[in-house]
Amino acid sequence: MSLVVPALPPGETFGLLAEFGSPKELYHGCERVRDAGYKRWDAHSPFPIHGLDHAMGLGRSRLPYVTLFFGLCGAVGGFTLQIWANGIAYPIQVSGKPIFNWQPYMPVTFELGVLLAAISTVVGMLAFNRLPMLFHPLFGTRAFEKVTDDGFFISIEAWDPKFNPIETERFLKQIGATNVELVARDGGRVVEGRGSSEAGASQDAKAR
Amino acid sequence: MHPEDNVSFEPVVGRAPLILGGHDFHSITEAVAAPMERTPSLGWWIAFACSASLLGLLLLSIAWLFWEGIGIWGLNVPVGWAFDITNFVFWIGIGHAGTLISAILFLFRQKWRTSINRSAEAMTIFAVMCALLFPGIHVGRPWVVYWMAPVPNQMSLWPGFRSPLLWDFFAVSTYGTVSLIFWYVGLIPDLATMRDRSKTRIRKIVYGIFALGWRGSQRHWRHYEMAYLILAGLATPLVLSVHSIVSMDFAVAQLPGWHSTIFPPYFVAGAVFSGFAMVVTLMVITRKGFGLENIVTLLHFDNMAKIMMVTGMIVGYAYAMEFFIAWWSQSPFEQFAFVNRAFGPYWWAYWTMVTCNVLSPQVFWFKQARTSMVVHFIISIFINIGMWFERFTIIVTSLHRDFLPSSWDMYYPTIWEIMTLAGSFGLFFTMFCLFARFLPVVATAEVKGVLPAANPHLGEEGHVAQSWTASPAPEGAV
């Protein structure tokens, strides 16, 4: 079930989780991590912080292309459906109007375009984010429960080329982290019979 | 003295803060989540029991309708549409305020929307559910209602896509779907909050599944915020199209009183008007019941009162303009339809509408009225009644005087139609009670984002006003 469990490279340690006191400290912390050259890292906050993606050096989301493509598919498909159904499959003359005209088909064309655009936006957003992912190593730590309340975190993964447990921890403390902890790959705790327990792991995530 | 008088104004732009009571991030979570985590109050049980009883009434009247047929309603020639379509248009209009708050005010960066958008969006979904009910049951043979959808069938028949009634089917079902996914996307971060606060295993599992494993990642927020922006951008023309198309059910017909080019904007304004009234009705109760006075503040009610006043006057203008056009057209049928509307046998419905929709919101010129919960509640009920009568007036008065006087007749509702109307309120309020019990009624993630402390540049030179004004995000950012 790759849908609910992240695909991570081999290794015992997931990485470091550093807590910051406020959005402001997180923002400046992210700028420092970005400038230090880390690549496999992330920031976590209970709400979107404006400009943080810039501070992290992330580009613009490409989601609008997904929306545009599927929105056009919906509109073109919807128009074709109507022209075909009322013009070819079962042509009916209504009050002497031409069989092939575009005006009366515009409302449904628009609605189907919007419908497909909206659905594809949400599906695309979830796909880009690899969600749903009910288990994640970070869920194993106690501190991380605050991330949906009032906690601000930076996580740096162990697979980052620049990662070094001691150096990176020192670096994180230096840029203002109040608390830094090492997170295990399986979520900070030993799961019995882990070899066969992917479903168990995802249950832990749900139940955490 | 208003609570607002006690607070200092934000020094840079001089605006009152959106959230009062010295809330920080954690206390907002507490304030919103706590009512869901304790045993429901007696007030909730009373509200739920009343709503569920009305819902029972709805199920009963629908069951009898399906068994016996449309004959149990007071419909006959020439009035073939009455309570059913009145209720449909009424409910679909209620929903529009939710989308206006969640999408249009989002695009205009009206940050005060964050306190009320969740419940307004929920209201939209429940109103659309009520609305969809009526076209579904009024068709006479509800088991073939799927004929409206373009489904290949053994008769090789296809729906007539040139009919506004079919446009309506697509518009309303698209609107319902898009509203639902917009609402759900907004809920994901708050469901994660509920998951992380859960004390019992069943809550953790249920909230956990619906939260999809959300972990507040900035890499996720980036796509999430883009998705939210796109959905708002899609919902805005959608909501305008939906009530325009609803109005075309009437405007495309050749009937005096319906055949009017001002219907689309007139209906959209009326929809927003009635929808805001319903938001106010619900928020007065929810705010009091859940103790959210500092999150849904008097500022919010002040703003909503102004919107109701503006849309109410647009509607009043449309009423006047219909008469002007009737006179200007020099069409005797058109003129008769409007004189009959105001002074014919349904004069009471027309003047109820004018009193409730045009006169009653005028009290909101006074600040005391805009910040009084009692006035808000009373006026919002008046507007709900007035907007129901608006649709009733448009539909029934235009139909009951046919072109041939020999066809003229009166329409009176039967007990079953009244029960169905009352029952639709039961469905609406039952859903809202369940929503208020199990889901966060305030979008906490968004409310936290409008606190001054959420600004990453708080107190820095040149950035002070950022969380208060719509300053553009840095280039390359969403």
Image (cartoon, helix red, strand yellow):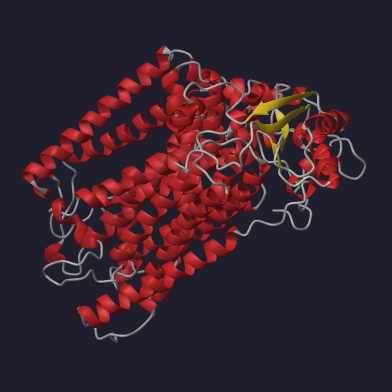
Name the residue at 82% across, 47% down.
A37
Front one among A113 and B44: A113
Residue A104 left/right relative to B109:
left
Which of the 4 image quarters holds residue B180?
Answer: top left
Expressed as whole percent of the image width and height from the top left, the position of residue B53 reads 26, 25
Residue B63 left/right relative to B424:
left
Quadrant of the frame with the N terminus of chain A: top left
Expressed as whole percent of the image width and height from the top left, the position of residue B234 reads 52, 58
Which of the 4 image quarters holds residue B435?
Answer: top left
Name the residue at 44% across, 26% down.
B205
Q: Is residue B182 above or below residue A97?
A: above
Total residue callouts: 0
Front one among B14 and A159: A159
Asked whether the viewer can see residue B38, the reply is yes
Residue B150 left/right relative to B213:
left
Front one among A92 and B305: A92
Q: Is residue A97 above or below residue B159?
A: below
Q: Is residue B237 above or below residue B138?
A: below
Q: Is residue B233 above or below residue B199?
A: below
Which of the 4 image quarters holds residue B326?
Answer: bottom left
Name the residue at 51% across, 67% down.
A69
